[in-house]
Image (cartoon, rainbow, N blue to C red):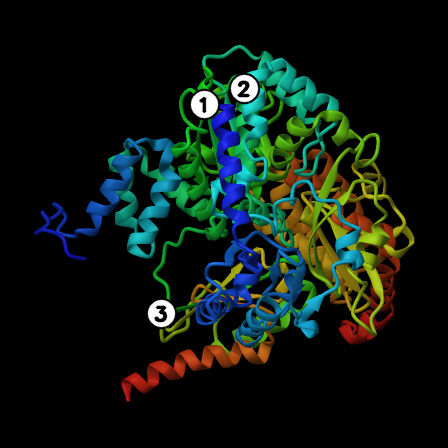
Amino acid sequence: MTLEDLRELAEKEQARQAQYEHRILYCSSAGCVSSGCDAVEAELRKAIDDLGFTKTCEMIGTGCLGLCGEGPLVFVHSDPTLYQRVDANIARRIVEEHIGHGKKVADHAIDLNDPFFASQKKIVLENMGKINAESIEEYIAADGYEALAKALTEMSPEEVIAEIRKSGLRGRGGAGYPTGLKWDIVRKGVADQKYIVCNADEGDPGAFMDRSVLEGDPHRVLEGMGLAGYAVGANQGFVYARAEYPLAIDRLKTAIKQAEKFGILGNRIFESGFNFRIDIRIGAGAFVCGEETALLRSVMGRRGRPKVRPPYPSEKGLWDRPTVINNVETFANVAPIIRQGSAWFSGIGTAKSTGTKVFALAGKINRTGLVEVPMGIPLRSIIFDIGRGTPEGTEFKAAQTGGPSGGCIPKEHLDLPVDYESLQAVGSIMGSGGLIVMDNTSDMVDVAKYFMEFCMDESCGKCIPCRVGTKHIHTMLDKIIKGKATEMDFELLKEMCMMVKETSLCGLGQSAPNPVLSTIRFFQQEYTVKLKAATEFNDNGPVPLSVTKES
Amino acid sequence: MTQPEPQKHPSGDNRFKLLDRAITKHHSSGDALIEILHVAQGIFGFLENDLLVYIANTLKLPLSRVYGVATFYHFFRLKPQGEHTFVLCTGTACYVKGANEIQKSVEHHCGCKFGETTKDNKVSLISARCVGSCGLAPVAVLDDAVAGKLTAADAVKRISQWKEETKEVVA
């Protein structure tokens, strides 16, 4: 395959698509599968058959269309209309009325000018709702693998790295380390073998961005990894995916097979001297494996226990060789940067945090789903414009980002621009992109306890501050909730949090106290109320939860 | 499956042949231990001690290492499971939307805690960190089918349906 072959393929595919008058896309991502999109697909196909539209109408399964809470979703491409809550009945009506008579099924159509769509900026998710998730031809027709071909034929590895550095792309896994810098370190490392690892162990509860990208556009991730491999001089890549995501793993396997068949993965890619293979490693359910050193051990078939850094994986990673390890979303950003240039990318977002960020909106919010916004957008517009705020009759209380390593952002900070530094300044982190909204029914001490229970269970047990500390913090929080704690316990809790934060070995322990510290910072009253109640009624036994919870 | 008369595995259990095939595919490499445990669990349903010994011997790894890995990861089960599985998502979105209530009702109904199997071996209760369908919270996975926007009453109803199904068969 050469660049010309690739373009020819793209044109052929575009011509194939053009012969259909209508393209109906149904969302085949996990959210809609759960809402029953299989039945909808069957009915759509049947209706197309019955009414004799097979020659003019093509139907395909596509990646996440975003509005996961309103699924199953169906998108009619020719006359852009998005239908929500489609069942078999509506599916038939879409074919009969919309395809047949050009009349929209108005009661299920969503306004595409709604801020939910209009406020978004799609780079990572650009192919969602456009291409068939299981077809490499359609990916190629949407300019796919053009960046890899361009890099291999026209650019030197140094130029690729320079371009990524200039774009200002930072790791989307949460910490925000500059991607170009990481690649440069690996490039300069001297070794017989180097590796590329894609972290698809999306362990944060409440986050499903990486899953959606892998399910909807797996080739984009493979292309990003290929570019990384070329840039640093690696010829082997691994995708480490969660076992909980069987559909994502299937699509990824299909994509790898297709790419190998087309000569886009394997030997002498695009007739250059570059060889690159990608293998999948399936995780087995350990949150700590999202930590890079633990993940690398897991890729090698060991227990996922972190080790001390430095040396960083970029110096000594898999089998002690220099290893690039990036998150799914980071790799998904690489191809567009190479294709459209670093200047284009750095023009989006803020000066320090360029590009976009994908968020998984969930919790007490009217519109749950997957959104991609430019960095620096105020939190308020994500929650109130895109997500349409909390359900009627409830009041926004806090937004939680960064999962068990992040913090809660209260109402006062709603106008905060969403970028790495601003979130850190209020005691939270960008994290991988889970954004969970809580309303006034959530008790913040209970929220803190929930996250601490998570960290306590997931602590790998290697270092003592994390193993023992999380357990003690959990016990203290439980004591506070039960109204048995005193002021002294509260002071001890804060002290313990700082100790765990400062002395733990890896990111899990260092960030485990964050949810507690941030809820203390913004909702201290919810803690102290429970304390006071406890000291007041101490002799008569613990205060009932219902009394303390109201205040 | 229609295969020509297969040669029996020395153990007498032909499922080991499938396992051997997977091990060969990974060149008997210890680095692929997790992959092999996944395959083994897929074939046998759970990881019995003897099975771990077999894997350790075949991969030439110390048993401690195999056992250590099998117990480290939540996904691997060392005990057999009930006929049906009820996996409750306890991720943040589900927590905010009241997964706790479902957990309590289901535990009460089944008379056992999450992580256990009912006495009649019908239903295993499992809690998952996050199944990634946060838009539909609260979510549970009932025998591989995802049920979204679940209520405690629904959950209990679905479980009692399982129990009744089997009763009818007995009757």
Q: Position of residue A400 (x, y in %)?
A: 75, 53
Task: Please state, as top left, top right, bottom left or bottom right, where the N terminus of chain B lies in the image.
Answer: bottom left
Q: Position of residue B18 (x, y in %)?
A: 23, 47
- Amino acid carrying mark 2 in the image: Leu
First along the sequence among labels 2 and 1 = 2
Discs 3 and 2 share one subunit = no
Label 3: which secondary element: loop
Viewer-side residue, A175 vs A310: A175
Mark 1 highlights which residue? Answer: A269
The residue lying at 69 percent from left, 29 percent from top is A340
Q: State which quadrant residue A172 falls in.
A: top right
Decide: is B39 above or below A146: below
Query: Is mark 3 in CB contact (under 8 Å) with mark 2?
Result: no
Viewer-side residue, A104 vs A295: A104
Decide if residue A109 is in sight here: yes
Q: Position of residue B5 (x, y in %)?
A: 8, 52
- Amino acid carrying mark 1 in the image: Ile
C-alpha separation, residue under disc 3 versus residue under disc 2: 53 Å
Disc marking residue B83: 3
Subunit that carries the residue with mark 3: B
Mark 3 or 2: in front is 2
Viewer-side residue, A232 vs A538: A232
Mark 3 or 1: in front is 1
Q: In the visual, does B19 lie left or right of A441?
A: left
Q: In the visual, does A435 lie left or right of A83?
A: right
C-alpha separation, residue under disc 2 versus residue under disc 1: 8 Å
Q: In the visual, does A453 lie left or right of B51?
A: right
Classify 10 Å Cα crowding around label 2: few (below 14), some (14-19), many (20 and above). Answer: many
Decide if residue A307 is in sight here: no
Mark 2 highlights which residue? Answer: A152
